[in-house]
Image (cartoon, helix red, strand yellow):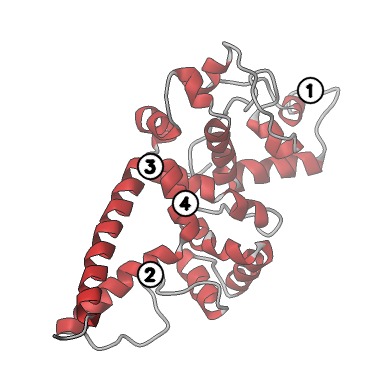
Amino acid sequence: MTAGKGPRFKIASTHAAGPSVVDELVGRVPVQRPEPTPADGEVVGTIVQPAAAPVVAKFGNADEPPTLEECEQHIRTITTQWLLGVGLALRAIRDHELFKTAGYDSFTSYVRHRQPLGMKPPQVTRVIQSIPVVEALENRTDREINEGQARVLVPVLEHGAQAVQEVWDAAANSGHPSARALAEIARKKGYLKGEDPNGGSDDPPPPPPSGTSAVLVRYQRALSAFDDLRGLRNLAKEEPDAARHIAAKLREALNELETDLTEDDAPAE
């Protein structure tokens, strides 16, 4: 794999005695819930070398060589679905609470201390969120889907997998499906609101606000972040302390605002 596209890696199965993640990707073996055995500690404790997947084992087997279709599928899986492979493993560690076998009380604590593949909690959250996006585009492209592209398409997924495919196809047909191009097309089709996360915008820039208008615009922009309810729920799950801090600040601001509004509405004596 070329530089910048994610490292070469092999990740153990989500089940200690089961197939590897590559098995689950190439062979479409369902993810399995782990048994609470001591061997599970090795799964989350280190990145280990699993037994060779059936297709991979065929590469050196003259008696049962792989088919052309199997080779091409394996190449697509390794080169275009790095986010999917890593995301599935991280999601399994989180959802099956495998981090507990290594002595961690929460998935966030596990990620903060172990930093799998050098990732911190915010990036891990983004990678896990990208899973359904990559799955929706699995048969749409031979390109590697990077984090920037996936980040744009995650909110589009709220409109269904077909919306993600529609945006991707339109961007691909126009040239290169960069994150900016995807965002522009998604906005034009009504799947995204607000400005391009990479800084682009189809609308002419408004005149700079001043005074009270500037304050209003600042708060309106802050409120637009809460349009992403899925992201907010994921934040509460992945970063509970940060989410509590946000909730406390919001409650404080709401109480202040309601007090001022109540005083303004009170009849003059």
Three-letter code for the amino acid on which mark 4 is drawn = Arg
Question: At x 66% / y 27%, what residue is drawn?
Answer: 33
**Residue 61: assigned label:** 1
Check disc 4 and report its element: helix, strand or loop: helix
Check disc 3 and report its element: helix, strand or loop: helix
Three-letter code for the amino acid on which mark 2 is drawn = Ser
Question: Real-space Cα distance between discs 3 and 2?
Answer: 21 Å
Residue 184 visible? The answer is yes
Of the image marks 1 and 4, the number of the one nearer the N terminus: 1
Question: At x 28% / y 64%, what residue is drawn?
Answer: 254
Three-letter code for the amino acid on which mark 1 is drawn = Asn
> Picture coordinates of residue 116 (x, y %)?
43, 32
Q: Nearer the viewer, mark 2 or mark 1?
A: 2
Check disc 1 and report its element: helix, strand or loop: loop
Question: Real-space Cα distance between discs 4 and 3?
Answer: 10 Å
Q: Pointer 4: residues within 10 angstroms few (<14), some, or many (20+)?
A: few
Question: Real-space Cα distance between discs 2 and 1?
Answer: 56 Å
Of the image marks 4 and 3, the number of the one nearer the N terminus: 4
Q: Is residue 79 left or right of residue 19?
A: left
65 up-or-down from 232: above or below: above
> Picture coordinates of residue 141 (x, y %)?
65, 58
> Picture coordinates of residue 167 (x, y %)?
60, 70
Q: Residue furthest front?
A: 269
Question: Real-space Cα distance between discs 2 and 4?
Answer: 15 Å
Residue annotated with mark 3:
240
Question: At x 43% / y 30%, what residue is drawn?
Answer: 106
Of the image marks 2 and 1, the number of the one nearer the N terminus: 1
Of the image marks 3 and 1, the number of the one nearer the N terminus: 1
Q: Nearer the viewer, mark 3 or mark 2?
A: 3
Q: Pointer 3: residues within 10 angstroms few (<14), some, or many (20+)?
A: some
Of the image marks 2 and 4, the number of the one nearer the N terminus: 2
